[in-house]
Amino acid sequence: MYQDRIYSATPDDLIDCIHSFDDHRDLAIMIGHNSGFTTLANILGNLHIDNVPTCGIVALKFEVDTWKNVKKKEGIFDFFYYPKMLGK
């Protein structure tokens, strides 16, 4: 699913977007712009990230049956990668 609103969305808009995901899918990838995504990771996740740099990837897992049940602070950080971490 592609949604233009993700690029400049607020964290609440992004959560609304997550809640609208198709429940037949158990994996979702969101690509967008900071600072909304750093804030989103911190709102949903169980750890704190100071900043998600350009091209950074944050993966959260949720133990829910439906996307509408994704709630704040219930995401379990799976991984966090960014380009400088991988070297030159």
Image (cartoon, grey):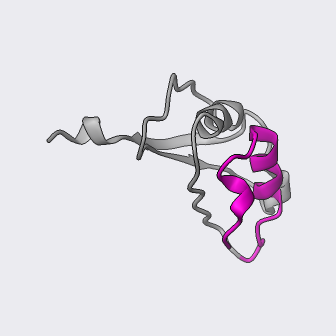
Task: Give the magenta-colored segment's residue range.
Answer: 1-24
Residue 44: x, y in percent? 70, 37
Give the camera-side residue of 20 and 45: 20
Q: At 73% across and 46% down in the image, what residue appears?
A: 9
Examine the rendered structure and indicate whether residue 19 appears above or below residue 53: below
Relative to 24, 42 lies left or right: left
Q: Is residue 76 located in the magenta-colored stretch of the structure? A: no
Q: At 76% across and 40% down in the image, what residue appears?
A: 10
Relative to 41, 56 lies left or right: left
Q: At 57% across and 24% down in the image, what residue appears?
A: 48
The residue sitting at the left extreme is: 88
Q: Quadrant of the C terminus?
A: top left
Q: Quadrant of residue 43?
A: top right
Give the camera-side residue of 38 and 72: 38
Residue 6: x, y in percent? 69, 54
Examine the rendered structure and indicate whether residue 38 appears above or below residue 18: above
Q: How many marks?
A: 0
Q: Is residue 4 located in the magenta-colored stretch of the structure? A: yes
The residue sitting at the bottom extreme is: 24
Q: Quadrant of residue 5?
A: bottom right
Examine the rendered structure and indicate whether residue 50 appears above or below residue 63: above
Residue 51: x, y in percent? 50, 27
Relative to 50, 62 lies left or right: right
